[in-house]
Amino acid sequence: MKALLKTSLLGLALVSTASMAANFAGPEAGVSVTMNGVTNTIHALNEDTTLGGQSPGFKLRGGYGFDMSNDAVVLLGLDFSATESEAGKVMGESVKIKNSWSLSVAPGLKLNDSTLAFVKLAYEAGKLTANSEEESISGFSYGAGLRTEINKTTFLETEIKQVNYKKLTSSGIDVTPSAIVGGVGVVFKF
């Protein structure tokens, strides 16, 4: 009788663990179509000037999801933007952000068995190019998203985030880049 009880409890524990991990836990990869709105605030000669631009793009994603309970998950991710983001023009030259990437943590809450809402915090980095010059930029972002199951291994994801880069100073001119990035994509679980 004790052996049957122990076996039943072990089986129940394995089934409940599998059901927790089935939806959002484990390794993942994805691709998203994005819309990028970039703003550069330039401070020179005691005046502020704002440049901006909008451009479509796409990003690649890899990550891993950890179930924390039946209803909570933490997603860790690495995103890479495979396109340049337009950030305005200075004296006829385009200002762009390129090679941008982020390392993120996103705690999420299951709304039901097939939908996850999450908030995301990330370290951001990339290159700001203007007038044939290139500067490394870094900063942080915050955002929110929703992931919905299409089938057991495929999810539709929507996300929006605010990116705030650190100020750059060159030749007495301060530039503070920022961006709002919205995206819709597909995530595949392995």
Image (cartoon, rainbow, N blue to C red):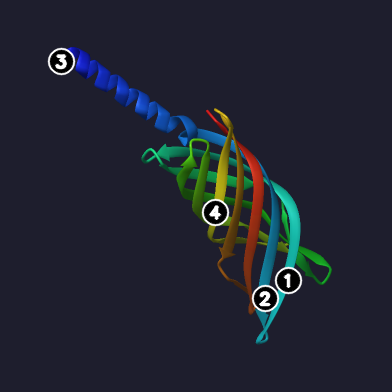
Q: CA distance from mark 1 to mark 2?
A: 8 Å
Residue 144's disc number: 4
The location of residue 102, given as percent across then percent down, is: 55, 51
Give the mark nearest the N terminus, 4 or 1. 1
User: Is disc 3 placed on a helix, strand or loop?
Assistant: helix
Callout 4 crowding tier (Cα within 10 Å): few <14, some 14–19, many ≥20? some
Q: Regarding mark 4 in the picture, which secondary structure is present there?
A: strand
Distance from Cα at disc 3 to Cα at disc 1: 73 Å
What residue is rendered at 75% in x and 63% in y?
53
Q: Which residue is depicted at the point 66% across and 74% down?
A: 41
* Residue 51 marker: 1
- In the image, residue 171 lies at what x, y percent? 65, 77
Residue 55: image location, x then y, percent: 75, 56
Q: Marks 1 and 2: which is nearer the front?
A: 1
Locate residue 5, reporting x and y percent.
20, 17
* Residue closest to the eye, 187 or 72: 72
Q: Which residue corresponds to mark 2? A: 42
Inter-mark Cα distance, 4 to 3? 48 Å
Residue 76 left/right relative to 60: left
Taking 20 as reference, is 100 above or below it?
A: below
- What's the CA distance linking mark 4 and mark 2? 28 Å
Using the image, determine if residue 3 lies above or below residue 116: above
Q: Nearer the viewer, mark 4 or mark 2?
A: 4
